[in-house]
Image: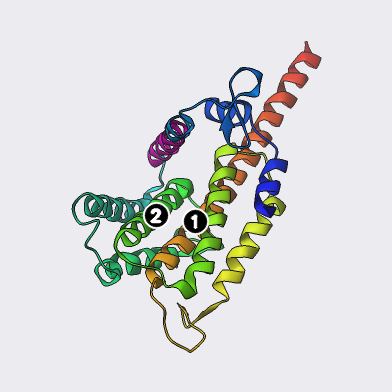
Amino acid sequence: MFFSKLIARLPIRRTKTHHFIQHRQRVDGKFLGPNGVVPVSQAVCSGLLEECFDISQEIKAHEDSKNVASSLKPIYDRLADIRQELESLVLTHRWTLRETDLWNYSLSLQEIDKMRVDGKFVDSEGNKPEGQYVLLYLLRRCYGLIYRLLSSSEPVSEELMPIANKLNTVKKCLNEVLKYGGPFNARDLYPYQLALFQIDSMRKEGRFVGVDGSIPEGQGIIMANLNECHELVEMLKESMDEDETEYEEDDEEYDDSDLSEEDD
């Protein structure tokens, strides 16, 4: 409930078609007909809207991939290969994979994650080259695919269900914020970061431990979900930085046009 109220208070950018449909035509998550009637086929329309959102994100990532700096290209290629392999596994081995089968993929993603400095990928000189968004997008997609694969074949123990449910709620809220767009600031993201920090702090030596000291089932699923949430936060931060840059450029253009008019 808290996260839902927070989302409702976030400023909405109405310049994009998807955001316009999302915000203007749904009330409490429902598409309404004349006189406020809730028509049938809600699931179909919502599903199509989600697909459109996924496609729009994919298009943005594809466009950004054209501008990946040469220093980040090896990371991009590695992530693209991992994603391709995971997508292939979803099609061929979705119901039979175990956590151990995906260990190498998880390890590779963790290694890439550790390359970041303050959430950014840097080059040998410590600069933050172009291509940040698409790398974060690929990381998020890879973690999401691992979660999808494990959730099809690995159970989550009853002891870990409260954590799993909380993570699902946080991820859902973060996805909603990503859909709505900005402008928003670091303060808007703080509740989600706090929730993830609280979940992170429950781990002991990287594992969620039961009351009796045992390691309950579902570690891989929860970690994949947790990592995906972290990547969503980083994507939102990156979008926030891009928005600030765009606004600064718009302000500069506006100032330049004012100066030109004064000169005339």
Q: Secondary structure at mark 1?
A: helix
Query: Disc 2 marks which residue?
Result: 144
- Which residue is at 53% across, 54% downward? 171
Residue drawn at (21%, 62%) of the image = 96
Q: Residues within 10 Å of mark 2 (few under 14, many from 20)?
A: many
Q: Position of residue 108 (x, y in %)?
A: 33, 66
Q: CA distance from mark 2 to mark 1?
A: 10 Å
Q: Can you say whether 136 is above or below 218 in the image?
A: above
Tell me which segment is drawn in magenta: 48-65
The C terminus lies in quadrant: top right
- Nearer to us: label 2 or label 1: 2
Q: Quadrant of residue 106?
A: bottom left
Judge from the rendering whether residue 29 lies leftward or rightward of residue 183; answer left or right.
left
Furthest toward the left, the residue is 92
Q: Amino acid at mark 1?
A: Glu
Give the residue at the far right of this rendering: 262
Residue 68 left/right relative to 200: left
Q: Which residue is mark 1?
A: 231
Residue located 57% across and 27% down the image: 38
Q: Is residue 49 magenta?
A: yes
Amino acid on which disc 2 is placed: Gly
